[in-house]
Image (cartoon, grey):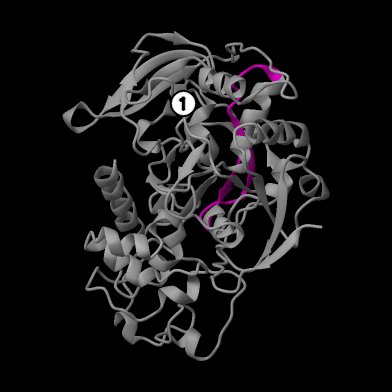
C-alpha cells in the first residue's frame, strides 16, 4: 500500500474557468515553434536554417556546451522563420507544418534487455532528453550523471491545472514504457506522487516505481514538495524530474520508434467561453485554439502555463515546451476607487485587509485579473511565506540570502532543494510585491556560475 503524506501548508486558488474533462477536437495549427528560451541554461547552435525541410524528430538546434542534447522539430514541414533578439540571440525556430505529419524513425528498443547506455542513446538521438530536468538548479540533466532518484508527479494542484487522471486514461502502456526507460537510468528509485483522493488504479499499479500518495492544498502536486517529503536533496545529491506527460512522450518513443510530441492541454481561465481539454502537438501556435473562444479579445492576458509560473504570450504566441495549459484571464480592470482603502467584500485576499477576509466570506471560485495592486517595495519579514510554504525551509531568510548572494547562507538554508515554482505561492502572498521566482532563478544561476 502506498504511503500517504499530508500537506498542511499551502493555498488553493479556486479560479473561474476550469477545463471540463472533455477532449475537444482542435484544428492543427499551421505554425509551430521550438524556443531555446524555454530551456534554461542552453546555449543554442542553429542546425536547420530557413528553407530546411524537416521531419518530426529531426534536429533544429543543439546545445553548444552539450552537442549531444538536440532539440527536434515536433512536426514535419519547412523552417520558415528564425526569430532573433538583441545581439542576435536565438529566440525561436518556426516550422510551417505539413498537412500530414511525417516522422523520422528510430530503432525500437526492448527495454527488458536494454541497459542504461542503450536507453540514453535512443533518447539523445530522438531529442527527448530535453524532458529530463536536474535538481539542483532546474536545468536539463547531463547524460554523464547517474541520479540518486527520479521523481514524477502524476497530478498538478496549481490553479486551473489540466486533469491528469482524465489525460492518462487509455495511455497506460506509454506511461509504463516511459517509467521502465527512466528506471534504467538510476541506481535509486523512480518515485511517482499521486493524488490520494483521485488517483486512478492504473497509475497506482505502475511497475518499476515507488508510489506515494499526497493530499492537501497546492503545492501538494509540485514535484519539489514531493521530493522534500520523500527524500530531501542534500549538497552533492542530484535527482532528476520528469513531467508526467513528457513520460508519455518518452514511452511512445520506445513503443513506436518515433518522436510523437502530442500532448493534451487545458484551455482554461475566466475569459474562455467553454474551457476544455484539447489534443495538440508541443510548440503549437495557440491561435487555432483560442479563436472564437475568448470573451473580450482586447483586454485579456494569454499565459502559456499556470497563472502562478507561466509565461505571458500574445494571441499569436506558441505553447511552451513544458506547458500543459493555456490560461486566459483579464489583463486589467479599472483602478479600484480608493484602492485598498475600500472594504472590498467581493475581493480575494489572504490578508486581513479586505472585507471578504474579515467577515469570513467564502466563494467557490474567483475571477482575478493580472494587476499587481501595488508596486515592489522593501522586503518585509512577516512570516507570511511560511504559511504557504510546506518545506522545512525558512523561505524569507533563504530569499534574503539569495538577494545578497551569500552562498554559505544559501547552502545552510536549503537552496539545493528549491526551484522557482516552489516559491510561486510566496509571490502570491508577498506584501512587498517582490518578483520572488525571478529572484530565485537569479540565485540559482549565480550558484552555477560560482560553483561551476
Residue 348 seen from this side:
no
Q: Residue furthest left?
A: 87
Taking 166 as reference, is 431 left or right? Answer: left
Number of marks in picture? 1
Taking 374 as reference, is 136 left or right? Answer: right
Q: Residue furthest bottom?
A: 359
Q: Secondary structure at mark 1?
A: strand
Quarter of the image containing the N terminus? Answer: bottom right
Quarter of the image containing the C terminus? Answer: top left
Give percent across and percent down for residue 377. 22, 72
Quadrant in the rendering for residue 344 = bottom left
Residue at position x 71%, y 36% in the image:
175
Residue at position x 59%, y 53% in the image:
161
Quadrant in the rendering for residue 293 = top right
Residue at position x 45%, y 32% in the image:
142
Mark 1: give few (<14), some (14-19) or many (20+) Cα within 10 Å: many
Q: Is residue 311 above or below residue 406?
A: above
Residue at position x 61%, y 56% in the image:
18
User: Which residue position holds label 1?
Assistant: 32
Which region is colored magenta?
A: 256-279
Quadrant in the rendering for residue 251 = top right
Amino acid at each position: 500500500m502506498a504511503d500517504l503524506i499530508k500537506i498542511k501548508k499551502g493555498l488553493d486558488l479556486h479560479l473561474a474557468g476550469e477545463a471540463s474533462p472533455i477532449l475537444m477536437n482542435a484544428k492543427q495549427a499551421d505554425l509551430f515553434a521550438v524556443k531555446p528560451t524555454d530551456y534554461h541554461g542552453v546555449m543554442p547552435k542553429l542546425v536547420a536554417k530557413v528553407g530546411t525541410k524537416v521531419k518530426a524528430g529531426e534536429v533544429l538546434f543543439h546545445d553548444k556546451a552539450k552537442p549531444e542534447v538536440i532539440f527536434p522539430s515536433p512536426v514535419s514541414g519547412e523552417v520558415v522563420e528564425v526569430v532573433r533578439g538583441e545581439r542576435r540571440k536565438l529566440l525561436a525556430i518556426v516550422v510551417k507544418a505539413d498537412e500530414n505529419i511525417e516522422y523520422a524513425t528510430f530503432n525500437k528498443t526492448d527495454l527488458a534487455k536494454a541497459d542504461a547506455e542503450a536507453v540514453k542513446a535512443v533518447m539523445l538521438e530522438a531529442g527527448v532528453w530535453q524532458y529530463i530536468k536536474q535538481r539542483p538548479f532546474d536545468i536539463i540533466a547531463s547524460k554523464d550523471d547517474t541520479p540518486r532518484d527520479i521523481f514524477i508527479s502524476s497530478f498538478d494542484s496549481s490553479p486551473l491545472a489540466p486533469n491528469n487522471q482524465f489525460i492518462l486514461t487509455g495511455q497506460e502502456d506509454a506511461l509504463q514504457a516511459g517509467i521502465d526507460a527512466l528506471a534504467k537510468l538510476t541506481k535509486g528509485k523512480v518515485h511517482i506522487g499521486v493524488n490520494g483522493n483521485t488517483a486512478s488504479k492504473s497509475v497506482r499499479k505502475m511497475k518499476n516505481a515507488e508510489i506515494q500518495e499526497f493530499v492537501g492544498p497546492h503545492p501538494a502536486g509540485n514535484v519539489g514538495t514531493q521530493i522534500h517529503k520523500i527524500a530531501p536533496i542534500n549538497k552533492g545529491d542530484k535527482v532528476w524530474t520528469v513531467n508526467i506527460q513528457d513520460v508519455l512522450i518518452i514511452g511512445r518513443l520506445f513503443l513506436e520508434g518515433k518522436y510523437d510530441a502530442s500532448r493534451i492541454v487545458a484551455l482554461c481561465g475566466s475569459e474562455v467561453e467553454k474551457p476544455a481539454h484539447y489534443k495538440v502537438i508541443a510548440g503549437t501556435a495557440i491561435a487555432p485554439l483560442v479563436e472564437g473562444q475568448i470573451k473580450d479579445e482586447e483586454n485579456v492576458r494569454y499565459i502559456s502555463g499556470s497563472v502562478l509560473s507561466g509565461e505571458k504570450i500574445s494571441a499569436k504566441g506558441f505553447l511552451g515546451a513544458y506547458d500543459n495549459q493555456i490560461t486566459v484571464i483579464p489583463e486589467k480592470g479599472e483602478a479600484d476607487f480608493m484602492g485598498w482603502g475600500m472594504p472590498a467584500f467581493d475581493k480575494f485576499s489572504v490578508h486581513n485587509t479586505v472585507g471578504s477576509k474579515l467577515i469570513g466570506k467564502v466563494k467557490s471560485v474567483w475571477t482575478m485579473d493580472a494587476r499587481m495592486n501595488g508596486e515592489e517595495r522593501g522586503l518585509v519579514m512577516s512570516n507570511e511565506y511560511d504559511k504557504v510554504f510546506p518545506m522545512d525551509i525558512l523561505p524569507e531568510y533563504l530569499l534574503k540570502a539569495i538577494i545578497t548572494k551569500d552562498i554559505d547562507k544559501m547552502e545552510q538554508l536549503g537552496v539545493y532543494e528549491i526551484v522557482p515554482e516552489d516559491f510561486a505561492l510566496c509571490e502570491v502572498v508577498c506584501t512587498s510585491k517582490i518578483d520572488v521566482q525571478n529572484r530565485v532563478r537569479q540565485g540559482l544561476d549565480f550558484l552555477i556560475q560560482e560553483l561551476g
